Amino acid sequence: MLIVLDVGNSTTVIGIYDMIETKLLHHWRITSLRHTSDEIGLLLTSLVKSADISSQDINAAIMSSVVPALDSPIIDAVKDYFNVDCMKVSIELDLGIEVKYSAPKEVGADRLVNSVAAVSKYGIGKPVIVIDYGTAITFDVISKDGAYIGGVICPGLMTSIEALFGKTAKLPQVALEAPSSVIAKSTIEAIQSGVLYGNAGMTDRIVSMIKDELGTTDCRVIATGGHSSLMSRYTETIHEVSPWLTLEGLRIIYERNA
């Protein structure tokens, strides 16, 4: 079995694949906190055990990471607790797609992984826009011939709320949920309205501008990440939500490079 780990700034998403059936058996989302390799190893083995899977059944591993401080502890934990070398996603691997970026090494590993999964899942012939709603909101564009050509990075939903809370003395920290109306009747609802509906409008505007630059309206728009299901309710441009797209991309890259 293959364990896949997508290490983000706020959360780490973990999955286990049956490599014979290429099936995602289990998945978890945990907070990306700095831990020792032993702490990470104990956490991973506990998750695996909770899925009624033996640690001895894990014989492969791959990770993508945008948190360098966690890379070595995770790689060491996988080696020490599963006796497996953990592959790490980078531009040097065979991704199966062309990366048309002025500085390819600057592209976040998660963005490359999402693009690989999008090409595999949706094919070529029309452009694909992948929107990942995480700590940052990223828009990644894959051309109609399956090449990664760039994208956009914006503050994430919770990042926006935390910035308001941290920089404005009288504003409260609020939950990320839709208010009863756009015209809010309280400060909490006003923040919720601004963050949710504001980011929905931003999503639609950026997608429209990307389509204009591509010279076509025939694009597939896919949302992933922790807030993708929520945001898809309020945008007009998202065609499909694929919450585990990154995990699928990790599996594909592992198979290409194992």
Image (cartoon, rainbow, N blue to C red):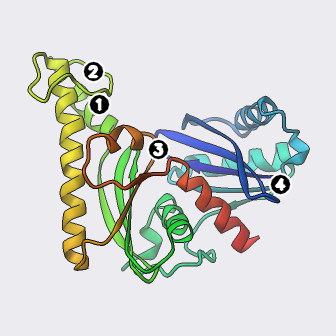
Pointers 2 and 4 in contact (C-beta within 8 Å): no
Q: Which residue is mark 2?
A: 173
Answer few, some or many: residues within 10 Å of disc 1's Cα (few below 14, many 20 plus, some between 14 and 19): some
Kind of residue indicated by mark 2: Gln
Q: Quadrant of residue 117?
A: bottom right
- Tell me the SS state at disc 3: loop
Marks 3 and 4, the one that precedes in the sequence? 3
Marks 1 and 4, the one that precedes in the sequence? 4
Q: Which residue is mark 4?
A: 84
Pointers 3 and 2 in contact (C-beta within 8 Å): no
Marks 2 and 1, the one that precedes in the sequence? 1
State the image coordinates of residue 79 (x, y, percent, origin top left). 81, 50
- Tell me the SS state at disc 1: helix
Answer few, some or many: residues within 10 Å of disc 4's Cα (few below 14, many 20 plus, some between 14 and 19): many
Pointers 2 and 1 in contact (C-beta within 8 Å): yes
What separation in Å lies between label 2 and label 4 (alpha carbons)?
Answer: 42 Å
Kind of residue indicated by mark 4: Val
Marks 3 and 2, the one that precedes in the sequence? 3
Residue drawn at x 65%, y 67% as measured from the top left: 253
What separation in Å lies between label 3 and label 4 (alpha carbons)?
Answer: 25 Å
- Asked if residue 36 shows in the view, the reply is yes
Answer few, some or many: residues within 10 Å of disc 2's Cα (few below 14, many 20 plus, some between 14 and 19): some
Kind of residue indicated by mark 3: Asn
Q: Which residue is mark 3?
A: 9
Pointers 1 and 3 in contact (C-beta within 8 Å): no
What separation in Å lies between label 1 and label 4 (alpha carbons)?
Answer: 38 Å
- Tell me the SS state at disc 2: loop
Answer few, some or many: residues within 10 Å of disc 3's Cα (few below 14, many 20 plus, some between 14 and 19): some
Residue drawn at x 77%, y 29% as measured from the top left: 50
